[in-house]
Every structure is written in structure tokens, then in C-alpha cells.
Image (spheres, helix red, strand yellow):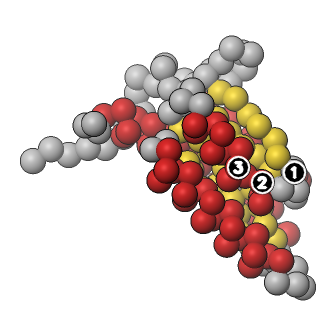
Amino acid sequence: MTIFEGRFSELAAVRIGVVVARFNDMVTSRLLLGCLDCLSRHGIDTADASSQLDVAWVPGCFEIPLVAQRLAASQRYDVVIALGAVIRGDTPHFDVVVAEVSKGVAAVGRESGVPVIFGVLTTDTLQQALERAGIKSNLGWSYGLEALEMASLMQGLPG
């Protein structure tokens, strides 16, 4: 029996693309900071212009899948992280956006073979989003960790 799992060492060659939605940037910028902190603390060069990391900003969550697809198709990245925040309002817009971004991000990973980490918060209130982006804990850190684990796992899988 062979067991495959991601490791958090030997990450020097890992390339990461991050797609961040500007809408609700009070939340998404905090998610990005948490994500970058995690990646940096695990040895990923996040400061240098020729580093292992690129960040693409998009207007809103609905646009995330298209840009994630472009990044994945470039064959430049081992993993893509999608960061956004959709906060429920008084209209059904929330349901439409959440459904499309989640389906789109999942499709990018399946079709490209490049893992795409779903770091899009879907909350009922701004307070809930802020709690998940740093007031209580920053899920951006978790998304960074998931990306490192998936990049390592994919490198170790056969085929």
C-alpha cells in the first residue's frame, strides 16, 4: 500500500497564483494578508518581484473563475488560491454569485489538473466575514496552508 500526502518541506520550487476579489476588500485584503503570512512562514518568497507568488485582483467573486482558469492554463503555477467574500444581502444575488463562483472554481481545478483552493467566504453578515478574516482567526492562513499541501501532494502523485 502506498500512502500519498502533502508535505510542508522542499517547497522552494512551488509557484502559487492568487486571485483576489476587490469587492468587500475590507475582508479580502485581510484574507490575502493572512495567506501571505502563512506562505512566507513556510518558506515561500512573497516579497521579490520574481518570487514564487503572483497576485491578480479581480472586480468581484464572479470574475474569480475566469482569471483562475487563465492562471492554471498558463502552466506556470502549481496551485491557485481564490480569495473572496460574498455577504448575504436582501436580494437573491448572494445565491447566484455563490453558486457560480463555487462551480467555476471547482471546474477550473478539474479541467486544468491544477488545484484551486476555494477561499471564498460566504457569510450572512459583515461581522461574520470580518471574524473569519482576522478578528477571531484569519482563514487566509488556512487557505495558504491548503495550497502548500495540495501543491506538494500533486507533485508526489503518479502520472
x then y, percent, for residue 106? 55, 59
x then y, percent, for residue 66? 70, 49
Q: Quadrant of residue 23?
A: bottom right
User: Which residue occupies 50% across, 33% down?
Assistant: 78
Q: Secondary structure at mark 2?
A: helix
Q: Name the mark nearer the viewer: 1 or 3.
A: 3
Mark 2–mark 3 contact, CB under 8 Å? yes
Looking at the rendered structure, the kind of residue marked 3 is Leu
Crowding at mark 1 (Cα within 10 Å: few <14, some 14-19, many 20+): few
The residue labelled by disc 1 is 59
Mark 1–mark 3 contact, CB under 8 Å? no
The residue labelled by disc 3 is 66
Q: Quadrant of residue 127?
A: bottom right
Q: CA distance from mark 1 to mark 3?
A: 12 Å
The residue labelled by disc 2 is 63
Question: Which mark, by number, is residue 78?
Answer: none
Looking at the rendered structure, the kind of residue marked 1 is Pro
**Quick check: can you spot residue 20?**
yes
- In the image: residue 5, left or right of residue 124: left
Q: Secondary structure at mark 1?
A: loop
